[in-house]
Each structure stands twice: as structure tokens, then as C-alpha cells.
Amino acid sequence: MQLADRSFTQRDCSSFSFWRDTVCETFVELDCRQHGSDRFKGQIQSRRLLDVSFATVAATPHTVVRDAQRIARSKDDDFLLSIIHEGEMGIEQRGRMTRLRPGEFAIYDTAEPYRIVLDQPFVQSVLRFSRKEINDRLLNPSLLTSRAVGGDRGMGAIASAYIRQLSAQLEDVSPMSGRQLRNTLLDLVTASLKDLTGESVPPVREGHHFFLNRALRFVEDNLLDESLSCESVAQALGVSSRYLRKLFEGRQHSLSEWIWHRRLEESLKSLGESQGAQRSITAIAYDLGFKDPAHFSKAFKVKFGMTPREYRLCGATGIAH
């Protein structure tokens, strides 16, 4: 398998309708609106590094909009990063409007509406990252979209310089170094985004362990919530449900099974407590997030060898954990 795709496509566009089609083909389905009636000029150069695409875009002023209607008929589900080299640009998403100046960058989510205002001649690079790679590294990417990362100091300066250098040298990247360069790129970008919130940065090699522990803690803190599920845990952690399920592969329980396991253990404790004797089995089941008392009783018997009523009558004698 070729690790670094060094081929590239370069297109010069003087017709705005052709430009709109080229932009949609290169990125995602968008509406492009030209500023003024002057002759439009634009150029796009596209390249790839493994699954990360790079596009250098130079053009005269226009605005691009991705709305809910276009999102609904699109299968695109990635994050884009724009870094401005010449001119300035505005990015708006989730009610946040940020202005980028040379060296600064920001990410935005293709699965949510956004607007980019390019109100002066510009040159920018646009990078495309898979949602999984971003979610694996950021707890809640939605809080970080359309927020400018400065390119003049700190981690932002390091990431900005790396993006510009890598983009300029991409044709000379060897297949052997491609994966390392791509991983470094993702680590620098996400680390600089975390600097915006002061979020601590777990080492990437410990990422799976980090998210697994957070998932387990979230389950414990929300065990009584009847809506607790793999999807709700994933949303709270800012990762995909698929990634979360993979974290539990090889463990004794899947995440859904673990939620049931912990709820059944807590029900056993409640049934055995003296104060629990004053509450009905149905009330205990509902309090622990079980939606169906009959289903709860059946699961309890499968796990402990007796029904909740039998356990309450005989106590904990002979119970099998």
C-alpha cells in the first residue's frame, strides 16, 4: 500500500460556475456566492497524505455556505481546517464567528452548517481530517470549531509552521515517513486546539486507556439515568459510538452489558439494605434506570440465580455474583 500519495491536481478557474463545481468536488457540497461583478479568478491545488487531503486555494472574493439542506443529502462527515497564508477570512459555525489572519487556523465540522466569508483576495490551505481521528484526540470537538488558533506563539505557532512546511514539501514525502508525518500533524493540530480551553493533553499512545476510564466514570456518575446508553456516553465524551464500542472489545462486558451489570449490582445492594425493604421492587428498578420491571426481574434471575422477590425473602444467602 502506498503511504503517501504525491500526485496532485491543479485547476485554474475563471468561470464562477466552474469554480463552484470544482469546490464542491474538492471539499463538500457548498453554495458559492461571488462578491461583485468583476471577473472571477481562482486556483485549487489538491494533494494527499494518507487519509489527510491538502488543498491550496487562491481566489478573488466570494462566500461559501454549507446549509442543512446540503448536509442532509451528503455523506460527508469530516472536519476541515483552514489556515490563511495571504489576506483574511471569516468562519462562522455554531453561532461563533472568527476572523483568521495570516498564520492562523481554525477547524469546522462538515456535518453542521457553516459559512466562510472570503472578502478579499486570499491564499489558504484547507486540510481534511476524518471524524474518527479528531474524536480520538479531542473530548468535544464541537466546542472548538470556528475558533482561531494563533500562529505567533505557543503550540499554535508550532502547528501553524508545521502545516505550512508540510504542505510545501508534500511532493517530496517518502512512503516510509508519510505515516509519522501524518500522525505528528494530527497531534500538533489537536494539541493546539486544546490550548484554547486549557484542556490537558493525554499522550496519544494512552488515548484508548484515557477514554475508557472516562467512559467508565461517566457510567458510574449517570447510572440512574434511564437514557444512559452507548450513544449518550459517546456524545458526552465527544467520540463516535463505533470508537467507544471498540474500546470495550476484549473486555468481559461490552459497554451496554457493563451498564446492565452495574445496574443489577446496585439493585442487589438496594434490595439487601434495610431502607430498601420499605420500597417496592418496581420502584427500585425504575430508580436504577430499568424501564421494564419484568425485564429487570428476568435479567436479575439470569445473573444471580433467583428473582428479586426471592432474594428479598431469603436475603443474600447463597447468592451467586
Image: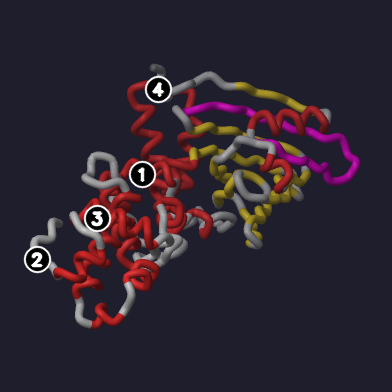
Judging from the image, what secondary structure is the residue with disc 3 in?
Answer: helix
Q: Nearer the viewer, mark 3 or mark 4?
A: 3
Query: Disc 4 marks which residue?
Result: 3
Position in image of residue 156 (x %, y %): 45, 53
Give, as a three-letter code, the residue at label 2: Thr
Query: Disc 1 marks which residue?
Result: 245
- Residue 204 in the image: above or below residue 53: below
User: Dot 1: few (<14), some (14–19), or many (≥20) neighbours within 10 Å?
Assistant: some
Residue 219's image quarter?
Answer: bottom left
Query: Disc 3 marks which residue?
Result: 301
Position in image of residue 214 (x %, y %): 32, 58
**Looking at the image, is mark 3 or mark 4 earlier in the sequence?**
4
Mark 3 vs mark 1, CA separation in Å: 26 Å
**Looking at the image, is mark 3 or mark 1 earlier in the sequence?**
1
Residue at 73% from the left image edge and 25% from the top image edge: 12
Judging from the image, what secondary structure is the residue with disc 1 in?
Answer: helix
In this view, which residue lies farthest toward the top?
1
Mark 3 vs mark 4, CA separation in Å: 53 Å
Q: Indicate left or right for 21 with 269 as reference.
A: right
Judging from the image, what secondary structure is the residue with disc 4 in?
Answer: loop
Q: Is residue 204 visible?
A: no
Q: Is residue 286 visible?
A: yes
Q: Indicate left or right for 120 with 227 as reference.
A: right
Residue at 74% from the left image edge and 33% from the top image edge: 42
Mark 1 vs mark 4, CA separation in Å: 28 Å
* Extent of the magenta region: 28-49
Mark 4 vs mark 2, CA separation in Å: 61 Å
Query: Disc 2 marks which residue?
Result: 317
In this view, which residue lies farthest toward the right?
37
CB of mark 2 within 8 Å of CB of mark 3?
Answer: no
Residue at 82% from the left image edge and 33% from the top image edge: 16
Give, as a three-letter code, the residue at label 4: Leu
